[in-house]
Amino acid sequence: AADAGQAVALAERIGYPVALKVISPDLPHKSEAGGVRLNLGDAQAVREGFAQMMAAVRQAHPEARIEGALVQQMAPPGQEVIVGVVRDPLFGPLVMFGSGGVEVEALGDVAFALAPLTAPDREHLLTSTWAGRRLAGFRHIPPADREAVAEVLARLAQLAADFPQIAEMEINPLRVLAPGRGAVALDVRVRVGEGG
């Protein structure tokens, strides 16, 4: 959406509640820049959220190119993890898994494995991190769809193998829903290199 009016029109079509996310190639971490608004339940909230978000981003990063805002339906609740691929010049694609969302920098809970991934490789990624162990549920945290995460890891490794021009890819966060319900990518970044 280029403006608040377009954001409202899209929200009406998608259905409330919605999330707004700033679109800018200069802001890889939208939430840290003030570029995310969540659970907007009506047209007035979308208008106000759009204006507040754009003002916050412009104040925090006046040099950033802002292309508008993404309007998305709110995802169901779940656990947030990070999955990704980084291409090492010596070893090739490395698959990453760990705690996602804002936890990724705070906790440093990330593990890597060489692609392609075998079933034991995926299992190792899931069991060697707190994020993976937490998928089984912990105290007040309900269990999440561990099998969906293993499938995402396998597909991500295959994607990196099939497209060597992918230098980096990060899904952060990947919202993991209740068991049997799958997972939803909430934010994705891809950097293309000269591979191949």
Image (cartoon, grey):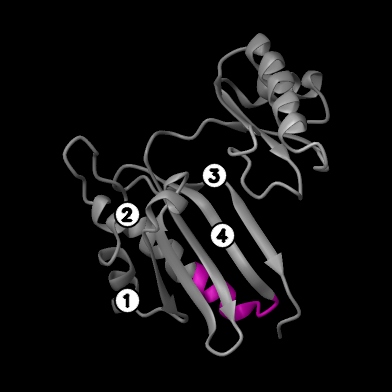
C-beta proximity under 8 Å, tags 2 and 3? no
Q: Does the magenta stretch include residue 161?
A: yes
Q: Which amino acid does label 2 sit on?
A: Ala
Q: Which of marks 2 and 3 is nearer the N terminus?
A: 2
Q: Which amino acid does label 1 sit on?
A: Ala
Prevailing secondary structure class for the magenta stretch in the rendered image = helix
182 relative to 10, above or below? below
Q: Distance between the residues labelled 4 and 3?
A: 11 Å
5 relative to 138, above or below? above
Q: Which of marks 1 and 4 is nearer the N terminus?
A: 1
Q: Which mark is residue 170?
A: 4
Residue sitting at x 32%, y 54%: 131
Q: Count residues near mark 4 (Cα–Cα under 10 Å), then give few for <14, some for 14-19, many for 20+.
A: many
Furthest-left residue in this view: 139
Residue 93 located left or right of residue 53 = left
Viewer-nearest residue: 57 or 113:
57
In the rendered image, which quarter contains the N terminus? top right
Residue 164 located left or right of residue 143 = right
Q: Earlier in the sequence, mark 4 or mark 3?
A: 4
| Image x and y of residue 162, in percent | 61, 79
Residue sitting at x 60%, y 22%: 15
Mark 3, secondary structure of its residue: loop
Q: Residue 131 carries which label?
A: 2
Mark 4, secondary structure of its residue: strand
